[in-house]
Image (cartoon, rainbow, N blue to C red):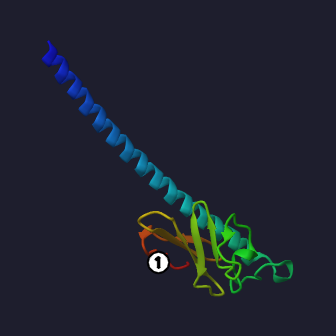
């Protein structure tokens, strides 16, 4: 009878150990997915606010149908500046965001999560839409062109 109880205790210990490892992996995967979703949501939010700036007439503080002078000081975004000298970079709890590739009709905003893999994503902001790129690690894949 003692041998059966010992085997049962060992079996239960192994099952609990396996269940713990599976739960930790599941939690980690869900946390990574939530971080990527937050990054993409911020990119779309930046794009939407920038489109409002684009449409607003210049005499009302907008771009007058141009993205030429766009930076984070021209519209509302919940990020804080990394440096007072660089209005093209902002940081919030979800990641770091950089505006680059600015032309009159479009610009690219790239977001990076501060994780071990350097997860990045970018979006091309156009006058009528925001084109999301794929998630990358290290460097963000280029988002699709404006339509």
- Horizontal and vertical percent for residue 137? 41, 70
- Horizontal and vertical percent for residue 58? 81, 82
- Asked if residue 32 lies left or right of residue 53, the reply is left
Q: Nearer the viewer, residue 146 or 120?
A: 120
Q: Quadrant of residue 57?
A: bottom right
- Where disc 1 sits, the SS reads loop
- Horizontal and vertical percent for residue 69? 71, 85
Q: Is residue 5 above or below residue 16?
A: above
Q: Nearer the viewer, residue 73 or 61?
A: 73
Judged from this view, the residue extending furthest toward the right is 59
Q: Is residue 71 above or below residue 39?
A: below
User: Which residue sits at x=25%, y=27%?
Assistant: 12
User: Which residue sits at x=73%, y=82%?
Assistant: 65
Q: Nearer the viewer, residue 142 or 91?
A: 91
Residue with the mark numbered 1: 142
User: Which residue sits at x=72%, y=78%?
Assistant: 54
- Quarter of the image for the C terminus: give it: bottom right
């Amino acid at each position: 009878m003692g041998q059966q109880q010992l085997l049962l205790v060992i079996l239960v210990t192994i099952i609990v150990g396996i269940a713990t490892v599976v739960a930790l992996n599941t939690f980690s995967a869900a946390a990574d997915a939530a971080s990527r979703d937050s990054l993409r949501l911020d990119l779309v939010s930046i794009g939407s606010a920038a489109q409002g700036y684009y449409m607003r007439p210049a005499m009302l503080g907008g771009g007058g149908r141009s993205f030429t002078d766009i930076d984070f000081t021209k519209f509302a975004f919940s990020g804080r500046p990394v440096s007072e000298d660089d209005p093209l970079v902002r940081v919030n709890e979800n990641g770091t965001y950089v505006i680059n590739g600015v032309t009159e009709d479009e610009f690219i905003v790239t977001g990076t999560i501060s994780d071990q893999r350097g997860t990045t994503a970018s979006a091309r902001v156009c006058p009528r839409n925001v084109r999301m790129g794929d998630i990358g690690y290290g460097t963000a894949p280029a988002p699709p062109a404006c339509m």
